[in-house]
Image (spheres, helix red, strand yellow):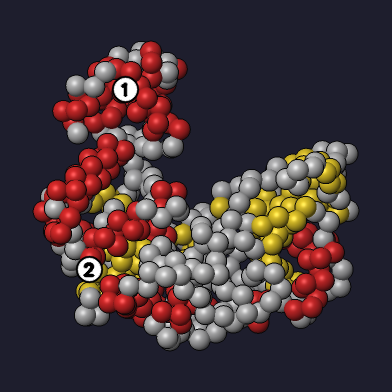
């Protein structure tokens, strides 16, 4: 790959660099503009048009680019498949199946150029025949700075023998231990000395020689671990679903019910990191043994009734106190304090609790706003709330499951919050009405009312 890049015409290199810009791909020193700012003392990032840069500068960026490293590894893998198709292990075919999933590229493009991240290379081409597998699961807490921190990690092998089971010191102030989810509290972490760096070192050791890493919605675990590794099998990606959108996936619990015939946990029971890692391994073993090539029906009744009395509010601007959300509803709803409110940059999400399912359904129906679906097919409305100071905040209110039926499947949400789609406007003029166009053949103008 390196020789081919060096021998390529400048126009080809320009297009590759533009591709990295368009897709947000970054190298060891960040993106294209970051690279220029650090390495060009004369022009910096002010001269960022790749066409106006020399071939040497383009090559310097691409040689250190994560994109090129991935292209080298993927190119070698694809070439090996063509030349030795019978040598590729069934396990490696599931790695390839994971990488072909439509959500893979979005979820597995990690910011591994940032401080604290570790990148583990896939190794030699001969490792493509490696069928050794490890399954992992992590638990995270919410910190005061709005980030998540790792507090437990478990790894098992294909015989379900424990290879790693560690409590981890987050080394920063914790805002919410999420005990109802993690099963951990402040006292459980008292005296814990293992750090994220220690875990990263352990992972590099046990993943040597091209071992395959398995997990459910594994990208979330790798994000928490700050560990970039490409030889993965994501159990959320290797099954086809008969009753879910193509971009959606089942929760680990629902998938185990449908594939393995048992639930990992009962309703209200916290996550067990070790059991979740074992479940992910068992799903892969079942896939290898039985195929499951046809679409499967996800276990029904997987959305607890306790969740159906709630509505999820998301993409809420951080400046808007959660209690103000209650202005949108009649009756006596409340903010669900047991639910994990999550901050993501300039926005957060939380749940609104109603007396019963009918009240939650009625509250959603009475909301003014354009009804759409999120990327997982769940109904939501984009609503506007007028504040006392005259500003108008825009955010989304979404149902907890498809439609209003209890027997619809629970979508993959290894950790909250659920998938959130469009970016709403932070502040809009209260005097203006939003107009949206709907319909495939005819245009209809719909006004979104502003709740006073």
Q: CA distance from mark 1 to mark 2?
A: 38 Å
Where residue 295 appears, x then y in whole percent?
46, 70
Is residue 209 placed above or below 289 in the rendered structure?
above
Where residue 107 appears, x then y in whole percent?
43, 52
Which of labels 1 and 2 is toward the front? 1
| Left or right placement of residue 375 versus residue 324 in this view | left
* Rendered residue at 50%/86% (across/down): 266
| Left or right placement of residue 283 versus residue 350 in this view | left
* Rendered residue at 61%/71% (across/down): 339
The answer, for residue 359, to whether it is visible in the render is yes
| Left or right placement of residue 252 versus residue 310 in this view | left
* Rendered residue at 38%/19% (across/down): 50
Residue designated by label 2: 133
Q: Nearer the viewer, residue 161 or 317?
A: 161
Where residue 117 appears, x then y in whole percent?
32, 49
Q: Looking at the rendering, which quadrant does residue 264 occupy? A: bottom left
Secondary structure under tag 1 reads helix
Residue designated by label 1: 12
Q: Residue 165 shows which numbered tag?
A: none
Secondary structure under tag 2 reads strand
């Amino acid at each position: 790959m390196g020789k081919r890049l060096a021998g390529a015409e400048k126009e080809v290199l320009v297009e590759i660099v533009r591709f990295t810009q368009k897709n947000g791909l970054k190298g060891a020193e960040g993106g294209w503009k970051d690279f220029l700012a650090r390495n060009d003392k004369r022009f910096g990032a002010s001269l960022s048009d790749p066409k106006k840069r020399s071939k040497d500068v383009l090559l310097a960026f691409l040689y250190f680019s994560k994109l090129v490293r991935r292209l080298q590894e993927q190119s070698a893998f694809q070439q090996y498949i063509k030349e030795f198709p019978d040598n590729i292990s069934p396990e490696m075919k599931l790695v390839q199946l994971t990488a072909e999933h439509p959500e893979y590229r979005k979820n597995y493009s990690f910011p591994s150029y940032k401080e604290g991240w570790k990148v583990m290379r896939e190794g030699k081409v001969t490792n493509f025949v490696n069928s050794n597998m490890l399954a992992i699961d992590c638990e995270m807490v919410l910190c005061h700075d709005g980030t998540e921190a790792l507090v437990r990690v478990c790894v098992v092998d294909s015989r379900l023998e424990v290879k790693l089971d560690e409590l981890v010191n987050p080394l920063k102030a914790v805002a919410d231990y999420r005990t109802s989810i993690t099963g951990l509290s402040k006292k459980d972490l008292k005296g814990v000395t293992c750090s994220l760096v220690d875990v990263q070192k352990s992972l590099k050791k046990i993943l040597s020689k091209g071992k395959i890493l398995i997990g459910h919605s594994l990208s979330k675990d790798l994000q928490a671990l700050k560990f970039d590794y490409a030889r993965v099998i994501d159990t959320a990606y290797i099954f086809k679903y008969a009753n879910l959108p193509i971009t959606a996936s089942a929760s680990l619990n629902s998938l185990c019910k449908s594939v393995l015939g048992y639930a990992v946990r009962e309703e209200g029971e916290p996550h067990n990191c070790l059991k979740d890692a074992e479940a992910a391994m068992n799903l892969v073993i079942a896939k290898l043994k039985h195929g499951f090539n046809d679409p499967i029906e996800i276990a029904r009744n997987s959305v607890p009734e306790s969740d159906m009395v709630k509505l999820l509010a998301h993409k809420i601007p951080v400046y808007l106190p959660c209690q103000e959300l209650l202005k949108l509803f009649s009756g006596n709803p409340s903010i669900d304090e047991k639910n994990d409110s999550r901050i993501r940059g300039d926005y957060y999400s939380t749940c609104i609790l109603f007396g019963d399912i009918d009240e939650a359904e009625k509250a959603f129906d009475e909301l003014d706003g354009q009804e759409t679906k999120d990327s997982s097919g769940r109904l939501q409305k984009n609503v506007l709330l007028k504040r006392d100071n005259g500003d108008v905040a825009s955010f989304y209110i979404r149902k907890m499951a498809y439609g209003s039926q209890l027997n619809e499947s629970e979508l993959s949400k290894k950790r909250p919050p659920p998938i959130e789609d469009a970016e709403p406007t932070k502040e809009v003029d209260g005097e203006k009405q939003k107009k949206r166009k709907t319909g495939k053949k005819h245009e209809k103008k719909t006004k979104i009312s502003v709740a006073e």
